[in-house]
Amino acid sequence: MIRLAADADADVNRSVDYRPGPDTRWQTAETPVVRRVVVGGIGTHRVHRVPLSGLEAGVTFAYRVSRNGRAVFESEARAPRVASQRQWFVE
C-alpha cells in the first residue's frame, strides 16, 4: 500500500506504476482511493491510498507516481516483512 498524502485539494488524475522486483516489468496499480481531509489550522488536502499486489515480503520494489499522465515522483520502498522474518531496530 502506498499512501500519497498532502496533495492539494484539486481534481487531478493520479496513478502509480510499480515494479515488484529488479527483474520485473512495470505494472499499473489499481485506481487510488481518495479521501478529502478538512482539518482546522491546516489547508484542505487529499490523501490517496493505492494497494499494490504481487510484492514479496521484505523485498525492495520501485514505484513512480504520475499526475495527469506525467511522472512527478519516483522512489523505492521495502514491502512489509512477515512475522517470521527477523526485524532490526536501531535506537
Image (cartoon, helix red, strand yellow):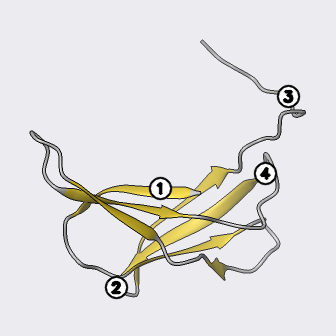
Question: Does label 2 or label 3 sit earlier along the sequence?
Answer: 2
What is the CA distance from the residue labelled 2 to the residue labelled 3? 40 Å
What is the CA distance from the residue labelled 2 to the residue labelled 1? 18 Å
Residue that label 1 marks: 3
Q: Are marks 2 and 1 in contact (CB under 8 Å)?
A: no
Crowding at dot 2, Cα within 10 Å, few <14 / some 14-19 / many 20+, comes out as few
Q: Mark number for residue 68? A: 2
Name which residue lies at 78% across and 67% down. Answer: 54
* Outermost residue to the top: 91
What is the CA distance from the residue labelled 2 to the residue labelled 4? 29 Å
Question: Does label 2 or label 1 sit earlier along the sequence?
Answer: 1
Image coords of residue 30 (percent x, y): 58, 77
Image coords of residue 16 (percent x, y): 52, 73
Image coords of residue 53 (percent x, y): 72, 67
Q: What amino acid is labelled 1 in the image?
A: Arg
Q: What amino acid is labelled 3 in the image?
A: Arg
* The quadrant where residue 66 appears: bottom left
Residue that label 3 marks: 86
